[in-house]
Amino acid sequence: MVSTTDTAATSTTMISASSPQSQSSPPPLVISPCAACKILRRRCVEKCVLAPYFPPTEPLKFTTAHRVFGASNIIKFLQELPETQRADAVSSMVYEANARIRDPVYGCAGAICQLQTQVSDLQAQLAKAQAELVNMQCQQANLLAFIYMEMSESEQQQQQEQQQTLQPPSLESFITSPPHSSYQINGSFSDWEPYWT
């Protein structure tokens, strides 16, 4: 419902815009009322407290906050705050109102509790994954140490075998080795016995 004074002001503005004198100057701007004044169906004054924070393009923003807090409480909150903090207060009220509509019992506290539960679950999963990572790193280190040990042992065996094959048998090993069985039978040298008898 539009008041008659608004209609008269609008028609006067349009008449002055069509006059020849106003063609040289820029046309006056017709400022539409803010979303809050539109919803409350009241005239939006020049220094409306709600106008900077509830533009006419965002009526849902005020509708949500008005539904939970009420217009008089919103105006009272904004008047008590300095202008530098009013924008943050409006965004907080709109967020709280949205949360309260979604969850009438807990509101923002329910969302915060749910997020804290998710954070604690994710921290537990992260700790478990880190423990598994440390365990796998220890297993890898043990496996690498075992592989290096096996490789060093096999290299040492190969070096010993190569040394044994390259060295001729020593004189001491030849002397200390037991005589061949064909040289001695029953304590006598049968191969050296003369064939005459």
Image (spheres, rainbow, N blue to C red):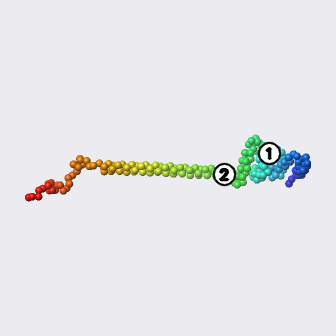
**Secondary element type, mark 1:** loop
Could you say which is closer to the camera, residue 186 or residue 69?
186
As drawn, is 100 to the left or to the right of 36? left
Residue at label 2? Answer: 111
Residue at label 1? Answer: 49
At label 2, which amino acid type do we have? Ala
State the image coordinates of residue 44 (x, y, percent, origin top left).
Answer: 83, 48
Q: Are marks 2 and 1 in contact (CB under 8 Å)?
A: no
Q: How many marks?
A: 2
Image quadrant holding the C terminus, namely: bottom left
Label 2 neighbourhood size at 10 Å, few (<14), some (14-19), many (20+)?
Answer: some
As drawn, is 141 to the left or to the right of 186? right
Could you say which is closer to the camera, residue 164 or residue 137?
164
As drawn, is 125 to the left or to the right of 111? left
State the image coordinates of residue 128 (x, y, percent, origin top left).
Answer: 54, 51
Could you say which is closer to the camera, residue 143 or residue 40?
143
**Secondary element type, mark 2:** helix
Q: Earlier in the sequence, mark 2 or mark 1?
A: 1
At label 1, which amino acid type do we have? Val
Which residue is depicted at the point 59% across and 51% down?
Answer: 122
